Image (cartoon, rainbow, N blue to C red):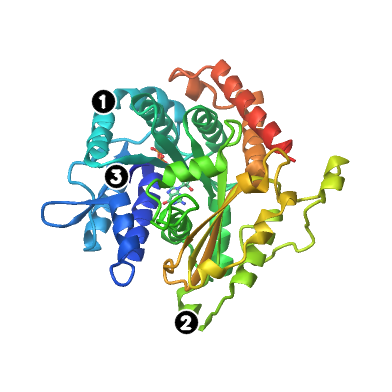
Amino acid sequence: MSVVTVQLGQCGNQVGQQLLHSLLCDAQEGQRKELCTASRERFFHQDTHGELVARAVLIDMEPKVINQSISRAARSGMWRYGETSHFSQKQGSGNNWANGFCVHGPAHREVVEELVRREVERCDRLSGLLAMMSVAGGTGSGVGTYVTQCLRDVYPKSFILNHLTWPYGTGEVIVQNYNSVLTLAHLYQLSDAILVHENDTVHQICSQLLNIKHISFADVNSVIAHQLGSVLQPALTADSQGAYSRNPLGELVSALCCHPEFKLLSVSSIPQVPLASMAYSSFSWPSLLKHLRQMLISNTKMEEGIDWQVRPLAAAERSRNLTAGSFNTSLANVLILRGKDVYSTETAGFEDPALYSSWLSPQEAFSVWKSPVPFNKYEKSATLVSNSQALLRPLDSMVGGAWNMFASRAYIHQYTKFGISEEDFLDSFSSLEQVISSYKELR
Ligand SMILES: Nc1nc2c(ncn2[C@@H]2O[C@H](COP(=O)(O)OP(=O)(O)OP(=O)(O)O)[C@@H](O)[C@H]2O)c(=O)[nH]1
Protein backbone atom coordinates (compact mmCIF):
# COMPACT_ATOMS: atom_id res chain seq x y z
CA MET A 1 0.00 0.00 0.00
CA SER A 2 1.24 3.48 -0.78
CA VAL A 3 1.20 6.93 0.72
CA VAL A 4 0.77 10.07 -1.36
CA THR A 5 2.71 12.96 0.13
CA VAL A 6 1.37 16.47 -0.42
CA GLN A 7 4.01 19.15 0.26
CA LEU A 8 2.66 22.64 0.88
CA GLY A 9 4.43 25.99 1.20
CA GLN A 10 8.13 26.60 1.79
CA CYS A 11 8.41 24.49 4.90
CA GLY A 12 6.29 21.59 3.64
CA ASN A 13 8.28 21.40 0.43
CA GLN A 14 11.65 21.52 2.18
CA VAL A 15 10.81 19.07 4.94
CA GLY A 16 9.00 16.76 2.48
CA GLN A 17 11.98 16.61 0.14
CA GLN A 18 14.31 15.78 3.03
CA LEU A 19 11.94 13.12 4.35
CA LEU A 20 11.66 11.32 1.00
CA HIS A 21 15.42 11.53 0.54
CA SER A 22 16.11 10.09 4.00
CA LEU A 23 13.62 7.26 3.47
CA LEU A 24 15.23 6.29 0.20
CA CYS A 25 18.82 6.57 1.50
CA ASP A 26 17.83 4.27 4.33
CA ALA A 27 16.09 1.76 2.07
CA GLN A 28 19.10 0.75 0.01
CA GLU A 29 19.31 -2.75 -1.38
CA GLY A 30 21.53 -5.30 0.34
CA GLN A 31 20.48 -7.77 2.97
CA ARG A 32 17.39 -5.64 3.59
CA LYS A 33 15.56 -6.46 0.39
CA GLU A 34 12.17 -6.98 1.99
CA LEU A 35 12.17 -3.66 3.83
CA CYS A 36 13.56 -1.88 0.82
CA THR A 37 10.80 -3.18 -1.46
CA ALA A 38 8.07 -2.30 1.03
CA SER A 39 9.48 1.18 1.61
CA ARG A 40 9.87 1.97 -2.08
CA GLU A 41 6.39 0.75 -2.90
CA ARG A 42 5.11 2.94 -0.10
CA PHE A 43 6.65 6.24 -1.19
CA PHE A 44 7.85 5.85 -4.82
CA HIS A 45 6.90 4.31 -8.11
CA GLN A 46 9.16 3.32 -10.98
CA ASP A 47 8.94 5.03 -14.34
CA THR A 48 9.43 3.20 -17.64
CA HIS A 49 13.23 3.63 -17.35
CA GLY A 50 13.28 2.13 -13.85
CA GLU A 51 13.85 5.51 -12.21
CA LEU A 52 12.25 6.04 -8.81
CA VAL A 53 9.67 8.81 -8.78
CA ALA A 54 8.17 10.13 -5.55
CA ARG A 55 4.46 9.62 -5.00
CA ALA A 56 4.27 13.29 -4.12
CA VAL A 57 2.62 16.54 -5.12
CA LEU A 58 4.36 19.87 -4.55
CA ILE A 59 2.26 22.99 -3.99
CA ASP A 60 3.39 26.52 -3.27
CA MET A 61 2.27 30.00 -4.21
CA GLU A 62 5.79 30.92 -5.38
CA PRO A 63 8.07 28.83 -7.57
CA LYS A 64 11.50 29.13 -5.91
CA VAL A 65 11.33 26.48 -3.20
CA ILE A 66 9.55 23.96 -5.41
CA ASN A 67 12.24 24.35 -8.07
CA GLN A 68 14.92 23.87 -5.45
CA SER A 69 13.27 20.74 -4.06
CA ILE A 70 12.84 19.27 -7.54
CA SER A 71 16.45 19.88 -8.50
CA ARG A 72 17.83 18.69 -5.16
CA ALA A 73 15.98 15.39 -5.61
CA ALA A 74 17.19 15.02 -9.21
CA ARG A 75 20.79 15.87 -8.23
CA SER A 76 20.80 13.00 -5.74
CA GLY A 77 20.76 10.66 -8.74
CA MET A 78 18.61 8.31 -6.66
CA TRP A 79 15.10 9.61 -7.21
CA ARG A 80 13.10 12.45 -8.64
CA TYR A 81 9.72 14.12 -8.46
CA GLY A 82 7.18 13.57 -11.24
CA GLU A 83 7.70 16.03 -14.08
CA THR A 84 4.20 17.44 -13.79
CA SER A 85 3.48 16.80 -10.12
CA HIS A 86 3.84 20.36 -8.97
CA PHE A 87 1.89 23.57 -8.95
CA SER A 88 3.12 27.04 -8.14
CA GLN A 89 2.17 30.65 -8.66
CA LYS A 90 4.11 33.89 -8.74
CA GLN A 91 3.45 35.31 -5.28
CA GLY A 92 3.20 33.77 -1.80
CA SER A 93 0.36 34.20 0.67
CA GLY A 94 2.10 36.96 2.67
CA ASN A 95 2.01 34.99 5.92
CA ASN A 96 -1.75 35.37 5.92
CA TRP A 97 -3.86 32.27 6.60
CA ALA A 98 -6.98 33.96 5.25
CA ASN A 99 -5.28 34.78 1.95
CA GLY A 100 -4.24 31.14 1.58
CA PHE A 101 -7.53 29.62 2.76
CA CYS A 102 -10.06 32.00 1.19
CA VAL A 103 -8.26 33.14 -1.97
CA HIS A 104 -5.40 30.95 -3.18
CA GLY A 105 -6.91 27.63 -2.09
CA PRO A 106 -10.28 27.99 -3.84
CA ALA A 107 -8.69 29.59 -6.92
CA HIS A 108 -6.52 26.54 -7.56
CA ARG A 109 -8.72 23.79 -6.19
CA GLU A 110 -9.24 21.94 -9.47
CA VAL A 111 -5.64 21.79 -10.53
CA VAL A 112 -4.46 20.64 -7.09
CA GLU A 113 -7.17 17.96 -6.86
CA GLU A 114 -6.21 16.74 -10.31
CA LEU A 115 -2.52 16.45 -9.36
CA VAL A 116 -3.38 14.45 -6.25
CA ARG A 117 -5.88 12.30 -8.15
CA ARG A 118 -3.18 11.32 -10.66
CA GLU A 119 -0.84 10.23 -7.86
CA VAL A 120 -3.60 8.34 -6.09
CA GLU A 121 -4.53 6.50 -9.29
CA ARG A 122 -0.93 5.42 -9.70
CA CYS A 123 -1.09 3.53 -6.37
CA ASP A 124 -2.20 -0.10 -6.47
CA ARG A 125 -3.74 0.55 -3.08
CA LEU A 126 -3.79 3.82 -1.21
CA SER A 127 -2.78 3.73 2.45
CA GLY A 128 -3.52 7.41 2.85
CA LEU A 129 -2.40 10.96 2.35
CA LEU A 130 0.41 12.72 4.19
CA ALA A 131 0.03 16.51 4.04
CA MET A 132 3.13 18.41 5.18
CA MET A 133 3.24 22.09 6.06
CA SER A 134 4.13 24.76 8.61
CA VAL A 135 1.41 26.51 10.58
CA ALA A 136 2.97 29.97 10.75
CA GLY A 137 3.12 31.21 7.14
CA GLY A 138 0.17 31.74 4.79
CA THR A 139 0.50 29.06 2.12
CA GLY A 140 1.29 25.93 4.12
CA SER A 141 -1.20 26.91 6.80
CA GLY A 142 -4.03 28.48 4.76
CA VAL A 143 -3.76 26.67 1.42
CA GLY A 144 -2.72 23.54 3.34
CA THR A 145 -5.89 23.64 5.41
CA TYR A 146 -8.02 24.28 2.34
CA VAL A 147 -6.38 21.42 0.44
CA THR A 148 -6.84 19.09 3.42
CA GLN A 149 -10.53 20.01 3.40
CA CYS A 150 -10.77 19.17 -0.32
CA LEU A 151 -8.93 15.89 0.19
CA ARG A 152 -11.31 14.98 2.99
CA ASP A 153 -14.24 15.60 0.58
CA VAL A 154 -12.74 13.66 -2.29
CA TYR A 155 -11.29 10.77 -0.21
CA PRO A 156 -13.74 10.51 2.70
CA LYS A 157 -12.56 7.02 3.66
CA SER A 158 -8.81 7.48 3.29
CA PHE A 159 -6.51 8.23 6.17
CA ILE A 160 -5.18 11.77 6.25
CA LEU A 161 -2.18 12.52 8.43
CA ASN A 162 -1.06 16.13 8.69
CA HIS A 163 2.57 16.74 9.56
CA LEU A 164 2.87 20.22 11.02
CA THR A 165 5.97 22.26 11.78
CA TRP A 166 5.29 24.64 14.65
CA PRO A 167 7.15 27.95 14.58
CA TYR A 168 9.92 29.13 16.85
CA GLY A 169 8.36 30.70 19.92
CA THR A 170 9.73 34.14 19.20
CA GLY A 171 11.03 36.35 16.46
CA GLU A 172 9.31 35.00 13.37
CA VAL A 173 6.02 35.97 11.79
CA ILE A 174 4.09 38.52 13.88
CA VAL A 175 0.73 36.87 13.22
CA GLN A 176 2.04 33.31 13.58
CA ASN A 177 -0.25 32.57 16.51
CA TYR A 178 -3.32 33.59 14.49
CA ASN A 179 -2.25 31.40 11.57
CA SER A 180 -1.48 28.50 13.89
CA VAL A 181 -4.81 28.72 15.74
CA LEU A 182 -6.84 28.89 12.53
CA THR A 183 -4.91 25.97 11.03
CA LEU A 184 -5.14 23.72 14.06
CA ALA A 185 -8.80 24.40 14.77
CA HIS A 186 -9.78 23.54 11.19
CA LEU A 187 -7.48 20.54 10.84
CA TYR A 188 -8.86 19.10 14.04
CA GLN A 189 -12.16 18.60 12.19
CA LEU A 190 -10.58 17.18 9.04
CA SER A 191 -7.50 15.17 9.83
CA ASP A 192 -7.21 11.69 11.35
CA ALA A 193 -4.02 12.59 13.18
CA ILE A 194 -1.80 15.65 13.50
CA LEU A 195 1.87 14.93 13.99
CA VAL A 196 3.84 17.90 15.24
CA HIS A 197 7.47 18.97 15.23
CA GLU A 198 8.31 22.16 17.09
CA ASN A 199 11.15 24.13 15.53
CA ASP A 200 12.45 25.20 18.96
CA THR A 201 12.80 21.60 20.14
CA VAL A 202 14.42 20.36 16.96
CA HIS A 203 16.80 23.34 17.00
CA GLN A 204 17.85 22.34 20.51
CA ILE A 205 18.55 18.78 19.35
CA CYS A 206 20.76 20.17 16.57
CA SER A 207 22.72 22.31 18.98
CA GLN A 208 22.94 20.13 22.10
CA LEU A 209 22.98 16.59 20.76
CA LEU A 210 24.43 17.03 17.31
CA ASN A 211 26.83 19.87 18.22
CA ILE A 212 25.95 21.89 15.12
CA LYS A 213 27.24 25.46 15.46
CA HIS A 214 25.42 27.41 12.75
CA ILE A 215 22.07 25.72 12.49
CA SER A 216 20.24 25.96 9.17
CA PHE A 217 16.81 24.75 8.09
CA ALA A 218 18.62 21.90 6.32
CA ASP A 219 19.96 20.72 9.70
CA VAL A 220 16.58 21.07 11.39
CA ASN A 221 14.90 19.25 8.51
CA SER A 222 17.38 16.37 8.71
CA VAL A 223 16.38 15.78 12.32
CA ILE A 224 12.67 15.98 11.46
CA ALA A 225 13.19 13.62 8.52
CA HIS A 226 15.11 11.18 10.71
CA GLN A 227 12.37 11.08 13.35
CA LEU A 228 9.51 10.97 10.89
CA GLY A 229 11.32 8.45 8.68
CA SER A 230 11.79 6.10 11.59
CA VAL A 231 8.01 6.19 12.08
CA LEU A 232 7.06 5.79 8.42
CA GLN A 233 9.64 3.23 7.32
CA PRO A 234 8.06 -0.24 7.26
CA ALA A 235 8.01 -2.23 10.50
CA LEU A 236 6.48 -5.44 11.81
CA THR A 237 3.38 -4.76 13.86
CA ALA A 238 1.35 -7.07 16.07
CA ASP A 239 -1.12 -7.64 13.22
CA SER A 240 1.26 -7.85 10.29
CA GLN A 241 1.98 -11.58 10.74
CA GLY A 242 5.69 -11.48 10.09
CA ALA A 243 5.47 -9.34 6.94
CA TYR A 244 6.11 -5.61 6.87
CA SER A 245 2.95 -3.71 7.59
CA ARG A 246 1.34 -2.38 4.43
CA ASN A 247 -0.88 0.22 6.01
CA PRO A 248 1.33 2.69 7.87
CA LEU A 249 -1.11 5.55 8.30
CA GLY A 250 -4.03 3.31 9.23
CA GLU A 251 -1.96 1.46 11.82
CA LEU A 252 -0.69 4.71 13.30
CA VAL A 253 -4.13 6.27 13.52
CA SER A 254 -5.80 3.20 14.96
CA ALA A 255 -3.06 2.69 17.54
CA LEU A 256 -2.95 6.32 18.68
CA CYS A 257 -6.08 8.28 17.89
CA CYS A 258 -9.01 6.40 19.36
CA HIS A 259 -10.99 9.55 20.26
CA PRO A 260 -11.74 12.59 18.06
CA GLU A 261 -10.83 14.98 20.88
CA PHE A 262 -7.25 13.67 20.98
CA LYS A 263 -5.36 13.92 17.71
CA LEU A 264 -2.07 15.57 18.58
CA LEU A 265 0.99 13.36 18.22
CA SER A 266 4.58 14.12 19.20
CA VAL A 267 7.72 12.15 18.41
CA SER A 268 10.93 11.42 20.32
CA SER A 269 13.89 9.42 19.07
CA ILE A 270 16.92 7.97 20.73
CA PRO A 271 19.88 7.92 20.18
CA GLN A 272 20.72 11.03 18.20
CA VAL A 273 24.46 11.59 17.90
CA PRO A 274 26.72 13.44 15.46
CA LEU A 275 27.69 11.31 12.46
CA ALA A 276 31.37 11.57 13.43
CA SER A 277 30.82 10.01 16.86
CA MET A 278 28.63 7.19 15.60
CA ALA A 279 31.59 4.81 15.16
CA TYR A 280 32.65 5.30 18.80
CA SER A 281 29.20 5.02 20.36
CA SER A 282 27.61 1.85 21.55
CA PHE A 283 24.12 1.54 22.95
CA SER A 284 22.23 -1.05 24.93
CA TRP A 285 18.47 -1.53 24.64
CA PRO A 286 17.78 -1.33 28.41
CA SER A 287 19.58 2.00 28.65
CA LEU A 288 17.97 3.45 25.50
CA LEU A 289 14.49 2.45 26.65
CA LYS A 290 15.01 3.64 30.21
CA HIS A 291 15.96 7.07 28.86
CA LEU A 292 13.12 7.13 26.35
CA ARG A 293 10.58 6.23 29.02
CA GLN A 294 11.80 9.00 31.28
CA MET A 295 11.78 11.41 28.31
CA LEU A 296 8.13 10.48 27.84
CA ILE A 297 6.98 10.88 31.41
CA SER A 298 8.96 14.07 32.06
CA ASN A 299 8.11 15.45 28.61
CA THR A 300 11.70 15.98 27.46
CA LYS A 301 12.52 15.61 23.81
CA MET A 302 16.24 14.91 24.31
CA GLU A 303 18.18 12.39 26.35
CA GLU A 304 20.15 15.31 27.74
CA GLY A 305 18.67 17.25 30.65
CA ILE A 306 16.04 14.65 31.56
CA ASP A 307 14.34 15.26 34.91
CA TRP A 308 14.72 11.90 36.67
CA GLN A 309 12.62 13.06 39.63
CA VAL A 310 9.35 12.93 37.67
CA ARG A 311 7.57 9.66 38.35
CA PRO A 312 4.15 8.21 37.61
CA LEU A 313 1.53 8.20 40.36
CA ALA A 314 0.26 4.90 41.68
CA ALA A 315 -3.43 4.17 41.02
CA ALA A 316 -4.37 4.98 44.63
CA GLU A 317 -2.75 8.42 44.43
CA ARG A 318 -4.46 9.08 41.13
CA SER A 319 -7.84 8.14 42.48
CA ARG A 320 -7.33 10.72 45.23
CA ASN A 321 -6.83 13.19 42.40
CA LEU A 322 -3.28 14.06 43.37
CA THR A 323 -1.33 15.78 40.65
CA ALA A 324 2.08 14.53 39.70
CA GLY A 325 3.91 17.78 39.11
CA SER A 326 5.18 17.84 35.55
CA PHE A 327 4.24 14.23 34.84
CA ASN A 328 3.13 13.76 31.25
CA THR A 329 0.10 11.48 31.02
CA SER A 330 -0.33 9.50 27.81
CA LEU A 331 -3.45 8.45 26.04
CA ALA A 332 -1.56 6.06 23.76
CA ASN A 333 1.99 5.35 22.60
CA VAL A 334 3.60 3.50 19.72
CA LEU A 335 7.19 2.41 20.33
CA ILE A 336 9.19 1.63 17.20
CA LEU A 337 12.39 -0.36 17.61
CA ARG A 338 14.86 -0.84 14.79
CA GLY A 339 18.15 -2.70 14.59
CA LYS A 340 20.01 -5.43 16.38
CA ASP A 341 18.32 -7.77 18.87
CA VAL A 342 14.91 -6.10 18.62
CA TYR A 343 13.08 -9.36 19.21
CA SER A 344 14.59 -9.94 22.64
CA THR A 345 14.12 -6.38 23.86
CA GLU A 346 12.10 -5.87 27.02
CA THR A 347 9.47 -3.10 26.70
CA ALA A 348 7.46 -3.73 29.87
CA GLY A 349 8.33 -0.24 31.23
CA PHE A 350 5.96 1.24 28.64
CA GLU A 351 3.12 -1.06 29.63
CA ASP A 352 2.84 0.41 33.12
CA PRO A 353 -0.83 1.47 33.60
CA ALA A 354 0.38 4.49 35.59
CA LEU A 355 1.63 6.04 32.34
CA TYR A 356 -1.81 6.11 30.79
CA SER A 357 -5.20 7.68 31.26
CA SER A 358 -7.46 5.38 33.22
CA TRP A 359 -9.98 4.86 30.43
CA LEU A 360 -7.74 2.70 28.25
CA SER A 361 -6.02 -0.48 29.34
CA PRO A 362 -2.26 -0.57 28.69
CA GLN A 363 -2.88 -3.33 26.13
CA GLU A 364 -5.05 -0.92 24.15
CA ALA A 365 -2.87 2.10 24.79
CA PHE A 366 0.54 0.69 23.97
CA SER A 367 1.85 -0.88 20.74
CA VAL A 368 5.34 -1.96 19.70
CA TRP A 369 6.53 -2.08 16.11
CA LYS A 370 9.84 -3.73 15.27
CA SER A 371 12.27 -4.18 12.46
CA PRO A 372 15.62 -5.99 12.70
CA VAL A 373 16.98 -3.66 10.01
CA PRO A 374 18.98 -0.76 11.51
CA PHE A 375 17.64 2.69 10.66
CA ASN A 376 19.70 5.50 9.20
CA LYS A 377 23.10 4.04 10.23
CA TYR A 378 22.11 3.55 13.88
CA GLU A 379 22.81 -0.01 15.00
CA LYS A 380 19.91 0.31 17.44
CA SER A 381 17.32 3.05 17.59
CA ALA A 382 13.98 3.65 19.26
CA THR A 383 11.27 6.16 18.38
CA LEU A 384 8.19 6.89 20.40
CA VAL A 385 5.07 8.41 18.84
CA SER A 386 2.94 9.66 21.64
CA ASN A 387 -0.58 10.95 22.02
CA SER A 388 -0.05 12.62 25.37
CA GLN A 389 -0.05 15.95 27.17
CA ALA A 390 3.35 16.74 25.59
CA LEU A 391 1.99 19.46 23.31
CA LEU A 392 -0.30 21.01 25.88
CA ARG A 393 2.07 23.77 26.97
CA PRO A 394 3.05 25.04 23.50
CA LEU A 395 -0.58 24.80 22.36
CA ASP A 396 -1.73 26.75 25.38
CA SER A 397 0.85 29.43 24.76
CA MET A 398 -0.03 29.63 21.04
CA VAL A 399 -3.73 30.08 21.82
CA GLY A 400 -2.94 32.51 24.67
CA GLY A 401 -0.70 34.62 22.40
CA ALA A 402 -3.33 34.72 19.68
CA TRP A 403 -6.05 35.59 22.18
CA ASN A 404 -4.02 38.51 23.60
CA MET A 405 -3.66 39.98 20.12
CA PHE A 406 -7.27 39.29 19.28
CA ALA A 407 -8.43 41.05 22.46
CA SER A 408 -7.12 44.32 21.01
CA ARG A 409 -8.22 43.27 17.50
CA ALA A 410 -4.62 43.63 16.29
CA TYR A 411 -4.18 42.79 12.58
CA ILE A 412 -7.73 41.43 12.39
CA HIS A 413 -8.56 43.62 9.39
CA GLN A 414 -5.92 41.69 7.39
CA TYR A 415 -8.06 38.59 7.85
CA THR A 416 -11.52 40.08 7.56
CA LYS A 417 -10.61 41.64 4.22
CA PHE A 418 -10.23 38.11 2.80
CA GLY A 419 -13.48 36.87 4.35
CA ILE A 420 -12.51 35.48 7.76
CA SER A 421 -14.79 37.03 10.36
CA GLU A 422 -14.28 37.70 14.05
CA GLU A 423 -16.83 34.93 14.58
CA ASP A 424 -14.53 32.49 12.74
CA PHE A 425 -11.72 33.44 15.09
CA LEU A 426 -13.95 32.94 18.12
CA ASP A 427 -15.02 29.51 16.86
CA SER A 428 -11.39 28.52 16.41
CA PHE A 429 -10.48 29.74 19.89
CA SER A 430 -13.32 27.85 21.47
CA SER A 431 -12.60 24.59 19.67
CA LEU A 432 -8.94 24.71 20.69
CA GLU A 433 -9.86 25.65 24.27
CA GLN A 434 -11.87 22.44 24.26
CA VAL A 435 -8.86 20.45 23.03
CA ILE A 436 -6.66 22.04 25.71
CA SER A 437 -9.16 21.26 28.40
CA SER A 438 -9.50 17.63 27.26
CA TYR A 439 -5.74 17.10 27.35
CA LYS A 440 -5.51 18.83 30.75
CA GLU A 441 -8.12 16.45 32.11
CA LEU A 442 -6.28 13.37 30.86
CA ARG A 443 -5.57 11.23 33.88
N1 LIG B 1 11.65 23.23 10.12
C1 LIG B 1 11.48 24.09 9.13
N2 LIG B 1 10.73 25.19 9.29
C2 LIG B 1 10.58 26.02 8.24
C3 LIG B 1 11.21 25.81 7.00
N3 LIG B 1 10.88 26.83 6.17
C4 LIG B 1 10.06 27.64 6.87
N4 LIG B 1 9.87 27.15 8.13
C5 LIG B 1 9.01 27.67 9.18
O1 LIG B 1 7.76 27.90 8.57
C6 LIG B 1 7.16 29.08 9.05
C7 LIG B 1 6.91 30.01 7.89
O2 LIG B 1 6.16 29.33 6.95
P1 LIG B 1 6.60 29.04 5.45
O3 LIG B 1 6.42 27.58 5.18
O4 LIG B 1 7.94 29.65 5.18
O5 LIG B 1 5.54 29.90 4.68
P2 LIG B 1 4.55 29.50 3.51
O6 LIG B 1 3.67 28.43 3.98
O7 LIG B 1 5.35 29.22 2.28
O8 LIG B 1 3.65 30.79 3.34
P3 LIG B 1 3.89 32.23 2.63
O9 LIG B 1 5.36 32.53 2.80
O10 LIG B 1 3.00 33.13 3.39
O11 LIG B 1 3.47 32.05 1.21
C8 LIG B 1 8.12 29.61 10.11
O12 LIG B 1 7.69 29.12 11.35
C9 LIG B 1 9.46 28.98 9.74
O13 LIG B 1 10.27 28.78 10.87
C10 LIG B 1 12.00 24.64 6.85
O14 LIG B 1 12.59 24.34 5.81
N5 LIG B 1 12.10 23.83 7.94
Q: Which of 210 and 287 is in front in this view?
A: 287
Q: Is mark 3 on a helix, strand or loop?
A: strand
Quarter of the rendered structure image containing ligand 1: top left
- Residue 241, image x and y in percent? 43, 54
In front of the other: label 3 or label 1? Answer: 3
Task: Mark 2 or mark 1: name the one nearer the start of the chain.
Answer: 1
Quick check: can you spot residue 225?
yes
Q: In which quarter of the image is residue 372?
A: bottom left
Q: Which of 72 and 299 is in front in this view?
A: 299
Task: Verify CB contact (< 8 Å) between mark 2 and mark 3.
Answer: no
Other residues around mark 1 within 10 Å, as few (<14) / some (14–19) / many (≥20):
few
Other residues around mark 2 within 10 Å, as few (<14) / some (14–19) / many (≥20):
few
Other residues around mark 3 within 10 Å, as few (<14) / some (14–19) / many (≥20):
many
Task: Verify CB contact (< 8 Å) between mark 2 and mark 1.
Answer: no
* Residue 56: mark in rendering: 3
The residue where tag 2 is placed is: 279
The residue where tag 1 is placed is: 110
Query: On the rendered image, what quadrant is the N terminus found in?
Result: top left
**Three-letter amino acid code at the position of disc 2:** Ala
- Residue 95, image x and y in percent? 45, 35
In front of the other: label 2 or label 1? Answer: 2
**Three-letter amino acid code at the position of disc 3:** Ala
In the rendered view, would you say 123 is above or below 224? above
Distance between mark 2 and mark 1 Cα atoms: 51 Å
In the rendered view, would you say 122 is above or below 224? above
Determine whether the beta carbon of the residue marked 1 sits less than 8 angstroms from the nearest atom of ligand 1.
no
- Residue 390, image x and y in percent? 65, 47
Task: Mark 3 or mark 1: name the one nearer the start of the chain.
Answer: 3
Q: In screen coordinates, is 300 left or right of 341?
A: right
- Residue 85, image x and y in percent? 23, 41
